Image (tube, grey):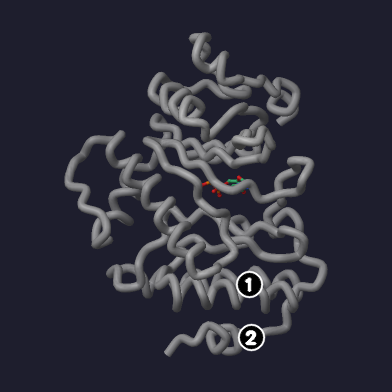
Amino acid sequence: TKADEEIQKIISKKRLKSVEDRRVGSEIFDEQTLKTLYKLANHGYLTVLNGAISTGKEANVLKGIHEDDSRVDSFVAVKIYRIATSDFKKMQYYIQGDPRFNVKSNNKRQLITSWVNKEYRNLLRAHEVDVNVPKPIIAMNNVLLLEFIGDDLGNPAQTVKNQPPIDVDEFLNKLLIEMNKFINEANLVHGDLSTFNILNKDEKPVIIDVSQSVVRDHPIANDLLIRDINTIFKEFKKMGASADLEEIKAALNLD
Ligand code: ADP
């Protein structure tokens, strides 16, 4: 929103330490979130936090700046899950049955921490087999730091929904290559794949929002996979893609 752009309230390391300010950008965060942000700043992961990139139902994504040892600035994406508005039922549903997590507790903060960790690990797993995803930097409590996807000036890449590809068939082909690696090499199913969760970075797809992604032997993995494929087929068809469903499935090497 306009307010978000205008406020651009910059919280430097010093400010983060000294001011008891509950605002980050135009958002108000709780005590634990601020403490986590201070900690990330103090550990050198984050120097400045400014403008909101997105305010979703459960998470805010902000743009941060990280200054490396040689004082070179780079942008980072800071995804902050809001504890008050998190969908714990959904989190529990997806975490149950994932052999990597053993969350028995009903503690909401713990559940969010596991959820953020899950997103971090899913991203890492995809990144390691070279899927085009934002490289994860660190997960701490309800905050996830990610590689910023955008241009050198700090403009974030748009979603495919907002910025449809110029050549839809070519873009879909590139996406299918990424999905193939995601499914068959990272052994993950995205679970919420759509043009909202694919960024168009210079006409190349970057897959985001993998918090709900599950391992392929998860009991719900196959249903999610079928849903993802159908969604991609429908949405790309609408944008004018020529591939049919069978061709898409064939490109994904599914038996
Ligand atoms: P949510 O679960 O709230 O939808 P997403 O992970 O989908 O969170 O991110 C919401 C939005 O934030 C995206 O649509 C995109 O515009 C922006 N965004 C997310 N991750 C990044 C990133 N690494 N770099 C740049 N922008 C991002």
Residues tagged 1 and 2 counted as in contact (Cβ below 8 A)? no
For this view, does 138 lie left or right of residue 77?
Answer: left
For the N terminus, the quadrant is: top right
For the C terminus, the quadrant is: bottom left
Which one is nearer the viewer's eye here, 31 or 41?
Answer: 41
Query: In the rendering, which numbered label is found on residue 244?
Result: 2
Q: CA distance from mark 1 to mark 2?
A: 15 Å
Q: Residues within 10 Å of mark 1 (few under 14, many from 20)?
A: many
Asked where in the image residue 165 lies, by quadrant, the reply is bottom right
Asked where in the image residue 163 lies, by quadrant, the reply is bottom right
Q: Give coordinates of residue 194: x percent, y percent.
A: 58, 62
**In the structure shown, which secondary structural element does the residue marked by tag 2 occupy?**
loop
Q: Residue at x 75, y 23 (%)?
A: 6
Q: Give coordinates of residue 41: x percent, y percent.
A: 51, 27
Q: Residue at x 54, y 46 (%)?
A: 146
Q: Residue furthest left?
A: 104
